Image (tube, rainbow, N blue to C red):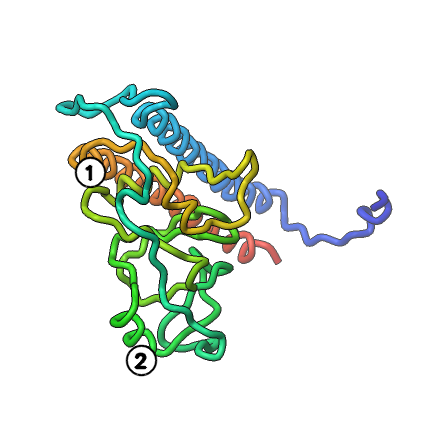
Amino acid sequence: LHGSDVAAIGFLFPSRKEQAAISSVVFAFDDLIALHQRKLDHLKLRKRGLLQKMFPKDGADVPEIRFPGFTGPWEQRKLGDFGRVAMCKRIYKEQTSDNGDVPFYKIGTFGSDPDAYISEELYEQYRSLYPYPKPGTLLISAAGSIGRIVEYRGEKAYYQDSNIVWLEHDYALDDLFLMQCLSSVKWTLEGSTIKRLYNKDILEKRVAVPSVPEQQIVGSFFRELDDLIALHQRELDHLKLQKKALLQQMFV
């Protein structure tokens, strides 16, 4: 790209007064966006620091920071001690459509917008006859972006078998606490990131676990922090969309 190419580009310019007015609005949005971005970054750093202090470090059996009333050591346990890996019954391509009643999430659309659907009838039949997550269950990606976590909150949806799984566990493990454990897990095998999570990889994974009451209070604490982070992210995204819309309307 040469200087002559740039010089030849045509622009529409308003008066200097209108240019200044437009710039002040845009710069005000930029400052507001930057402020919200700093707040969001600070919250994420704060959470990272708290996770390091509120979970035991390698070789330790108690965390640096603890809620009052809890003193016992945390145990190193395999996830398989608490339950088994479960998944939805297989859905075949011919059972899906480009639009329909119930979203069918494959590994490529897990945690985003679906591109396939199944019928209400098939959904109700499979949900009643075969394994299906309960509200609050943590779904885990076993392929693609290994170890990604999405909480199932009771919406109508169906998930690709073997690629999207969950730990069907007993009441000795709190899901909100488990979410923080799984979010910080590094799935590695022989020094390298694994290409796929198999059931045994999940069941053999060791995590530090306190008593159930302590799990619940730690899990609830981080849920509130996660909700605050999500709120700031939504506000930031909204501001960016507002700025984009204004730029489209304020320029010819």
**Dot 2, how many residues are within 10 Å of its Cα: few (below 14), some (14-19), or many (20+)?**
few
Residue 216 is tagged as: 1
Quadrant assignment, res 222:
top left
| SS category of the residue bearing label 2 | helix
Point out residue 171 in the picture as x, y percentages from the top left corner.
18, 46
Point out residue 5 in the picture as x, y percentages from the top left corner.
84, 49
Residue 121 is tagged as: 2
Question: Which residue corresponds to the image point at 36% horizontal and 76% vertical from the top-left?
Answer: 101
Nearer-the-camera pick, 13 or 44: 44
Q: Amino acid at mark 2?
A: Glu
Quadrant assignment, res 233:
top left
Can residue 243 be seen at all in this image of the molecule?
no
Q: Do tag 2 and tag 1 residues touch (Cβ < 8 Å)?
A: no
Quadrant assignment, res 213:
top left
Point out residue 164 in the picture as x, y percentages from the top left corner.
41, 57
| SS category of the residue bearing label 1 | helix
| 225 relative position to 214: left or right | right
**Dot 1, how many residues are within 10 Å of its Cα: few (below 14), some (14-19), or many (20+)?**
some
Q: Amino acid at mark 1?
A: Gln
The image shows residue 148, relative to residue 45, as above or below, that is below
| 175 relative position to 198: left or right | left
